[in-house]
Image (cartoon, rainbow, N blue to C red):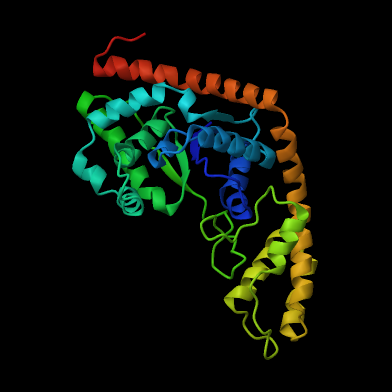
């Protein structure tokens, strides 16, 4: 069975865009691959978070992924910081990474532009830590967005470079596994093309029904169709995208016909979307509450995930030490 490795950024609560963009794919993958999902808490240090923020974010993201269907019995989910072997491989890769190639990476340049007062070494060496995350598991596939392809290519480069320097065929070159073929693009409620935290246009999986209803009823619309069978403008197409995601075909067809014959009432459309989102969200929200209330279970999942991950990587790091010339243990 092929191994899939993916990092989870502890960046706050999940929204519908996260669910249909990646999380749903993760849930499907755990039935088809040997999956390792890690919460990238070391990566978060590049933004200098407070200790309590790290702990809260890690627990939040763990709870919500579990509520969405990630099963610790099927996939290994662990904290990056619980697997110290990753740092050792990170060190080895840094020793063979060149300043120029790290400075040219798009992610480094973008982050340096966004936080000019905190251009730290962690930002610069993000690609080597990402490579260590991946290669220590000898992952076959890594689900990534298009924005991470350059970093994936660098991970393959570091694998080739290690093999060349030491005259071995040790690390395989991991392949990018894109979500775009299966993932849905969930629009924002403000009429923009994508739901995102920074845009403030999200419906979160933890949102209570009344919160969802208020958000949806504020969604941007227009003056309505001016003639039968006219094309839908983007803001209205966005609402129909929500219908396609959370409602059944009969409901979609009903409102589509109302649009085509110019009798659509946006208030009715929004109310139906809101109720169907509430129906979709409710089981997940209830599981979020259930997991959040069971700290003993979360501790058990975290500890068992760490044990599984460490067991999986220890052979790799022992062999790397031997290849490089260090004493093994």
The image shows residue 298 at horizontal and vertical percentages of: 65, 27
Quarter the C terminus occupies: top left
Specify whether 79 is left or right of 204. left
Q: Nearer the viewer, residue 111 or 37?
A: 111
The location of residue 30, given as percent across then percent down, is: 60, 36
Tell me the residue at 78%/66% (across/down): 272
Residue occupying image coordinates x 59% and y 31%:
75
Query: Would residue 321 appear left or right of 255 to someone viewing this image?
Result: left
Measuring from the top left, give residue 162's x and y in whole percent.
26, 29
Q: Position of residue 161 (x, y in %)?
A: 24, 33
Which quadrant of the figure has residue 253?
bottom right
Q: Residue furthest bottom?
A: 227
- State the image quarter where residue 160 is shown: top left
Marker count (numbered): 0
Q: Examine the rendering and report whether any part of residue 214 can be seen.
A: yes
Q: Is residue 292 above or below residue 283?
A: above
Closer to the camera in the image, 71 or 294: 294
Q: Is residue 248 left or right of residue 70?
A: right
Q: Can residue 33 be seen here?
A: no
């Amino acid at each position: 069975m092929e191994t899939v490795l993916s990092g989870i950024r502890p960046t706050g609560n999940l929204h519908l865009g996260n669910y249909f963009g990646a999380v749903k794919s993760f849930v499907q993958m755990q039935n088809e691959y040997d999956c390792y999902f890690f919460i990238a808490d070391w990566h978060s240090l590049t933004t200098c978070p407070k200790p309590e923020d790290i702990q809260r974010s890690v627990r939040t993201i763990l709870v919500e992924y579990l509520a969405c269907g990630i099963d610790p019995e099927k996939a290994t989910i662990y904290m990056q910081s619980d697997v110290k072997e990753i740092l050792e491989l990170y060190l080895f890769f840094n020793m063979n990474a060149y300043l120029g190639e790290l400075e040219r990476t798009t992610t480094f340049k973008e982050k340096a532009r966004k936080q000019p007062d905190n251009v730290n070494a962690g930002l610069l060496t993000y690609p080597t830590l990402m490579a260590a995350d991946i290669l220590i598991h000898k992952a076959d596939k890594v689900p990534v967005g298009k924005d991470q392809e350059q970093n994936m290519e660098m991970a393959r480069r570091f694998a080739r470079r290690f093999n060349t320097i030491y005259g071995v065929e040790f690390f395989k070159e991991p392949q990018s596994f894109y979500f775009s073929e299966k993932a849905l693009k969930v629009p924002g409620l403000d009429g923009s093309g994508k739901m995102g935290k920074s845009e403030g246009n999200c419906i979160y999986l933890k949102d209570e029904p009344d919160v969802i209803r208020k958000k949806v009823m504020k969604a941007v619309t227009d003056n309505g169709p001016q003639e039968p069978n006219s094309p839908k403008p983007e803001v209205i197409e966005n609402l129909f995208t929500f219908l396609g995601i959370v409602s059944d075909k009969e409901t979609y067809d009903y409102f589509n016909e109302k649009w085509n014959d110019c009798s659509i009432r946006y208030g009715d459309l929004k109310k139906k979307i809101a109720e169907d989102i509430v129906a979709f969200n409710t089981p997940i929200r209830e599981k979020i509450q259930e997991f959040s209330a069971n700290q003993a279970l979360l501790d058990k999942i975290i500890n068992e995930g760490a044990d599984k991950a460490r067991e999986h990587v220890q052979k790799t790091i022992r062999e790397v030490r031997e290849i490089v010339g260090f004493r093994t243990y």
